[in-house]
Amino acid sequence: MIEERDDLYGAASPQELAAETYENYKRFVNPPLARVMKLSGSPVEVRAEGATIWDQTGKAYLDFAGGYGVFTLGHRHPRVVEAVRNQLDLISLSGKTMFNVLLGRASRRLAELAPGDLEISFWCNSGTEAIEGAIKLARAATGRAKIVGTVDAYHGKTLGALSVSGRETFQSPFRPLLADSVCIPYGEASILDEALAGAAAFIVEPVQGEGGVNVPSPGYLRAVREACDRSGAIFVADEVQTGLGRCGYRFACNRDDVVPDVITLAKGLSGGVVPVGAFIARPSVWHRAFGHAPLLHTSTFGGGELACAAALAAMDVLEDEGLADLARVRGEQLLGGARAIAGEFPKVVREVRGLGLLVGVELTHEGYGGWIIPEMLKAGVTAAWTLNQQRVIRLEPPLVVSENEIDRALQALRGGVATALVKLGPL
Ligand code: PMP
């Protein structure tokens, strides 16, 4: 249990804190989001530790939305918090004109963990920025423009990443997007050669997260590697959500034993404490793009000492606590339990799929989710939609989640599914 605070961010009561926050959201943050969150009964988060978030009333929630994959280590892992606290007393953001010890160490450590000869990394602050960097690297390295992504992919919401994120709702108000960007069906090896002809890059998630947790057949990424070799396209594996243990492997592309040209990372690389993104590239590719122009792609905040201290601690914890292996074991428990619920309620749950602790529960109808997620919240478990598939509820708890916590979340899921069926009947 974490230390109790006797004040609630300065508010007199939990009710006042909730009212103040809602009013601020409604007026100053995002009015329609404020309404949706209020309707679904969202409380106010006030503190968190491990797999648990506490709201303003002191109620505890198991965090199975997991910040959409950020909290691989759980909230406020003590080793990350300590590393960040210690770093605050030295230097927190880089002055940029001098060498930065921790940027060097974090880059070296990432290269040690990454597959094959992936070696040179660029550090930024989010997943979408990592993708932007990878797109630029691919264009500069190949002298080609075309970027190929996959239908239902999610790579972020800046214009370049959005161009290959396959959801029309997110794209259409912003057209024209990046010229020469196309999305092809995910998981289909036979179409790769034709699609990648003349392409600068193929950007693909080893498991599509926001697309509804779509796990390709084993061997798909190997086929991608071979097709990229034939066409000369840069193979970018977007591991922002799947990387660093989430799928039961250090990197999900290890499942197919392939070495992409570039891996993008963020989410778990933060250690759940400081925003961090990065891409890591093979030297041969990196040099073709940036070898003669060290300032061609830069970020003021990227690679700051505080972020690198968090990332270094996160990578150490991942290895020392064997989190990738844990994710595999707990993932089987979660997947098995959710599949049993699907078997019991076929009218509500169409399919359950996943890899490691990235699990998607596909409903027969989008409408059920509107009941299930709030019901789970009432029972003290957070869960979330996938961004590109409103019919899929994702469960992605911290990799440090216990067996008992998974059982409790499954109970909440079962309760939510049963209630949705009673309330809505067959849809
Ligand atoms: N790539 C993938 C695979 C993601 O899942 C996400 C976020 N859900 C992103 C990129 C974008 O990351 P961010 O929100 O940090 O920009």
Image (cartoon, grey):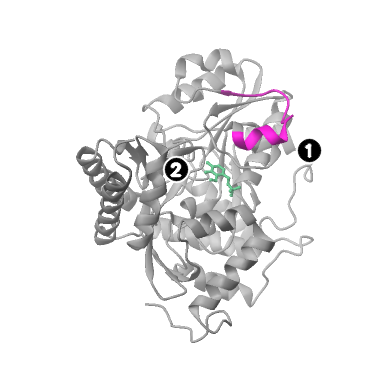
- Which comes sooner in the sequence, label 2 or label 1? 2
- Name which quarter of the figure residue 54 lies in: bottom left
Please provide percent x and percent y for residue 408: 26, 59
| Image region (quadrant) for ligand 1 | top right
Residue 240 in view in this figure: yes
Closer to us: 11 or 32: 32
Nearest-to-viewer mark from 2 and 1: 2
- Name which quarter of the figure residue 96 lies in: bottom right
Closer to us: 98 or 186: 186
Please provide percent x and percent y for residue 39: 49, 57
Please provide percent x and percent y for residue 258: 45, 31
Q: Is mark 1 within 8 Å of ligand 1?
A: no
Question: Could you say which disc has been placed on residue 292 in the image?
Answer: 1
Residue 137 in view in this figure: no
Closer to us: 305 or 98: 305
Closer to us: 76 or 99: 76
Chain part drawn in magenta:
169-183
Q: Is 144 drawn above or below residue 351 in the view shown?
A: above
Q: Is residue 179 magenta?
A: yes
Please provide percent x and percent y for residue 189: 46, 19
Q: Write the residue at 65% across / 75% down.
A: 90
Residue where numbered disc 2 is placed: 251
Q: Quadrant of the C terminus?
A: top left
Q: Is residue 415 magenta?
A: no
Name the amino acid type tagged 1: His
Name the amino acid type tagged 2: Phe
Q: Write the residue at 43% across / 54% down.
A: 65
Q: Quadrant of the N terminus?
A: bottom left
Q: Is residue 71 left or right of residue 345?
A: right
Disc 2 packing (10 Å; few <14; some 14–19; many ≥20): many
Q: Judging from the image, what secondary structure is the residue with disc 1 in?
A: loop
